[in-house]
Amino acid sequence: MTANVEHLRTLAAVVDGGTFEVAAASLHITPSAVSQRIKALEQQSGRVLVRRSRPVEPTEAGTVLLRLARQLTLLEAEATAALADDASAASTPVPLVVNADSLATWVLPALARLDGIAFELVVDDQEHTLDRLRDGTAMAAIGSDPEPVQGCVAHPLGSMVYRATASPAFVARWCPEGWTPHAAAAAPMLVFDRKDALQDRYLDAFAPGARPPRHFIPASTQFVDAAVLGLGWGMLPDLQADALVAEGRLVVLDDARVAEVPLYWHQWSLRSTALATVAAAIAEQAARTLRPPAGRMPGAAAGRRPGVPADGTPGAAAGRPTASPAPGRARPRSGQRSPE
């Protein structure tokens, strides 16, 4: 089919705005005109493209055309900038989906080096970021799934390393005799949100069946703050915890069970200058900051999934208690990587 560009732009406005009325205001046309354009696009495609709910949601067929609409908008903006007499031409924001820990540690320095590109950053769990690519609301994403979405490409970036961590005061209160499965079953646990499975995966290996009280802290920086304040223990990335461990404000509870979360860059299969520039900056920063992908580091394990012990010790998945640091004393970390 040969879709009308204005109709595609209207489809994107309806999905972004959530209602036909909001889309009409953004396009400076009437709601009736919006409805007519959507109906014309549906007749041309032979499919229902949006669910008339509040907010309006694209159907499976609608997401295909929504992605096309966004690709055309990006390419149109790049062409406009290339033809402009100066560098002040307005750019279309590039929607990127990023997991919260990456955004809080290493992604922003990569984006800060780029000029002339605007961003619309959306935060989601690393195991769910690709949903935004599938529904056409993002052009690129950082996620933990190595398999690319249809119409996209994927490249490995490296891994973030997570360890069970808490404050010295927490250790003194909840596990003064050491971090054991029994202590883990009772001690309060920090969880980012209901999509966050890192802590539960750790417990499945260390203390099977344990379901301790949990606090939901849906912000990466405040998650670390909660651990420092002794609200609970959590799986913290080395990139955030290293300095706090060195200062004695945090303690590594278990250095034997280290979780690696492999990250991948996903983007549309589109020849776009903006996307290529962003991808290069992300890859460069990842190489400086993350643990190298499997195959680039001697002894690296291939295909490791989030929450799987990275040390390879025979007892790591058997729930066998390990020695814990004394209250208020940090255990030295192995294989840690910090931002440069």
Image: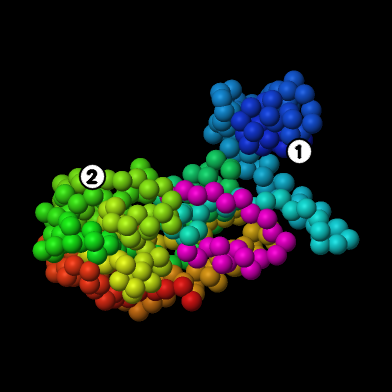
Q: According to the image, label 2 marks what residue?
A: 213
The colouring scheme, among rainbow, by chain, secondary structure or one colour, is rainbow
Residue 118 is covered by the magenta coloring: yes
Instruction: Locate the N terminus and report the quarter of the image it occupies.
Output: top right
Give, as a single range, the part of the protein colored magenta: 105-126
Left or right, residue 6 beside residue 206: right
Which label sits on residue 135?
none
Q: In this view of the protein, which residue sits in the foreground, 55 or 254?
A: 254
- Specify the amino acid type for callout 2: Pro
Image quadrant in which you'd find residue 69: top right
Which residue is more in the foreground, 136 or 167?
A: 167
Residue pictured at 50% horizontal, 54% vertical: 98
Q: Is residue 219 above or below residue 340?
A: above
Can I make out residue 26 in this image? yes
**In this rendering, would 173 be left or right of 62?**
left
In the figure, 98 relative to 331: above or below?
above
Q: Would you place residue 249 above or below residue 149 in this image?
A: below
Q: Say which residue label 1 marks.
A: 5
The residue sitting at 69% across, 25% down in the picture is 21
Residue at (44, 47) in percent of width and height = 128
Q: Is residue 36 visible?
A: no
Q: Position of residue 46 (x, y in %)?
A: 64, 26
- Tell me which amino acid carries mark 1: Val
